[in-house]
Image (spheres, rainbow, N blue to C red):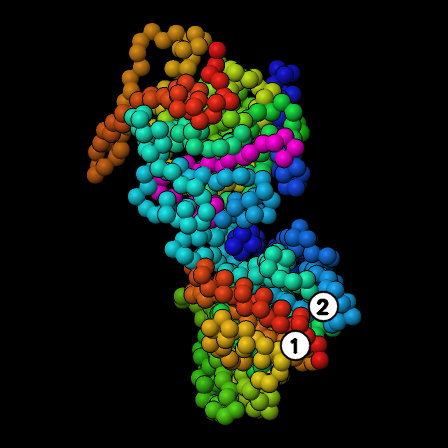
Amino acid sequence: MAKTRDWLKERTYHHSAFSDLAALVRAKEERGLRISLCFPTLNEAATIAKEIVVMRSELQLRYPLIDEIVVIDSGSTDATREVAAEYGAKVYLADEILPEIPAYKGKGENLWKALYVLEGDVILYIDADIKNIHPRFAYGLLGPLLLTEGVRFSKAFYDRPIALDQKNIKPTGGGRVTELVTRPLFSLFYPELSQFIQPLSGEYAGFRDCFDSISFPIGYGIETSMLLDLYDRYGMDAMAQVDLDKRVHRNQSTLALGRMSFGIMQTFLAKLKASGAAELGAELYDTMIQYELEAGSYRRRESEIRIVERPPMLSVPAYLEKFPGRKPDA
Amino acid sequence: MGNIIFLGEVPPYAGTWLSDDDTADPSYSVRARFFAERLAELGVDECGTDRLGNPIALIKGSEPALAPVLVVAELDSLNTPAGDIHYELRDGKIFGPGLLDNALGAAAALSLPDMLKRHCAPLRGDLLIAGLANTMRDAKNIALIERFVDGLERRPCAAIILKGGELGRLNYFSDAVIRADIVCDRREGERGAAEDMVVAATELVDRFLGIRIPKRPKSSLTVGMIKAGFKYGDPAAHARIGLELRSLSNEVLAELSRQVKDIVDLVRYEQRIDLVYDVAVELGAQNLGWEHPLVRNAVGVMRALELEPDVYPSVSELFYFLNRGIPAVTIGVARGQDYHQETAHASIDSLFTGMAQLMGLVTALDRGACHG
């Protein structure tokens, strides 16, 4: 367990450690890197303008840290795409990227397709529903990648859920799904990964090779799957987590979190099976069954949640054509 | 726009009001600290705080002997919701509590260093950019503005006071004004004493409204606040009335104030209650004059931007500058609605005109409009 404590101490940062934006820009330029920021969206007209303005004014106009801001939209029915374009982002409809491939709907699909249109060597994904957006969401995640040797992927956590001295560790840090589903599963099978305070956070950054070499579930399991794959490929030392303080976003109902938990467990078990770490004696069902109290009786609600997974982008010929420097895995 | 969001989402003040001494601590106002740090980060030549904790930045001009121009904005907000503040951008507008009073004005001041660097020739004279902290927290805190003006190390040749709205406003004269609290308390155990302070307060208000207010010089009496009671079924033991008297004439204001005091005295004896007439603010009328170069230049800039100047009297900061012989005007930077409410919002397009107006006026002053 000594190794576990070391990772937490050595690879956990607070965003304020990277608030010297000029230093980040210098590091980026010295290494000749380009950085892309991607917002996956679906009906985010209420928040996307502010997200773009905040990032653009601070991290493009004032400090040239981010080279492009890109919105990948799942087909919003509100004005998300128009607003985003008006405020200076490049906007793509996910369905129109790689149109020769049948399209799916989901955040994972957007993140995966973003790899084809983003130009950066470093890619930063930030959810578009953050009410208290601040440049720290970007520079906090980019900091470890630019300034710490060996770090290739960084993930956000929030609300100062943990302090690193032994007297002040708080018992919980994640949301309900994290604490009831993901962390128990990690503890059972990949104890080192349980050190991620919020493994399901939607904000992360990494070098392009982190993302184009792994598969992307299009639905709920994307964050879990990503951590498992990166852990497998690079190990803990290549990963970091950053405290971004408070994040304010939409709250989800317990039923919605139930479906999310179903998708995460589905993805996790499939990964376990594929890796040979566990055997399943039967096929898994793909329907989440929930009950809602309605007019004095329980109504059964069934949600079909199937695993649909995009292969590593490196296996897509069009991608290799666009990025000839990238080579498919041996 | 980034500056509006960053500044507007910082609570205007924090901590507990203990005494005047607290205001001397720059850490007392979180927003003041943010304002100072932001100015320093924007690369002004010097940035510090005065003895009250008000941030002041200096952009040096090429002729240091010239008196500086001062751009100043209040940092507080009248509407400060409990909990976090979140601004929104949608439908071509920016929304947020405290936006118009005065996150927008303060953000415009914050944006000046960048805008000047990008769009203007180097300044001849020095430019001071200041934020005023804690001035809206209590009616009596208006005195902090006086202390700020008196504490300025260099006397400015002119001051531009920035408000979030309304774009086109031009205040260069101030009303004489008295803002007073009238505090009513029940006398326990006194025979014949009025029991319900709501009734007593109503009696006072009725009599105040009977005072004859002259139309010339323009004057007014406004009962802006009444607070009393805590339970439906219990007579109120305490009431407080907030009253404002205004006039373009110092003499008329003094006469109105005398009449209010007389009513308070009379009701005190009639109702056998404790009544205190507590003057929170008393300012005299001041007028820079339409012909003053600062006013003429402000009007010229507005007309060049196709803005119709909206001229009316102001109170507060303007008085303190004018009273000390410092030419000053108050201008607004955006068109907004729902002032002082959670839903306060302003048109983003109007902001560009507002910033152009500010830049134009600073440039005109720097070219010598007020250097005599």
Q: Residue at x 58, y 69 (%)?
A: B360
In what quadrant of the picture does the N terminus of chain A appear?
top right
Q: Determine if residue B340 is in view.
A: no
Q: Residues within 10 Å of mark 1 (few under 14, many from 20)?
A: some
Task: Name the residue beneath numbered marker 2.
Answer: B125
Residue type at numbered disc 1: Ala
Q: Position of residue B244 (x, y in %)?
A: 53, 79
From the viewer's perspective, is residue A46 above or below residue B93? Answer: above
Measuring 23% from the left and 37% from the top, which residue is drawn there?
A294
Q: Which residue is mark 1?
A: B369
Whether residue A4 is visible here, answered yes or no, is yes
Q: Residue A34 magenta-drawn?
A: yes
Please report, as a chain letter, where disc 1 is located.
B
Residue A217 lies in quadrant: top left
Numbered range of the magenta stretch: A29-52
Q: Residues within 10 Å of mark 2 (few under 14, many from 20)?
A: many
Q: Is residue B124 magenta?
A: no
In the depicted structure, whether residue A157 falls above or below residue A284: below
Q: Is residue A24 above or below residue A220?
A: below
Q: Could you give the CA–CA distance between mark 2 and mark 1, rounded to whole angstroms?
A: 12 Å
**Amino acid type assigned to the residue bearing label 2 in the image:** Gly
Asked if disc 2 and disc 1 are in contact, CB closer than 8 Å, the reply is no
In terms of image quadrants, where is residue A107?
A: top left
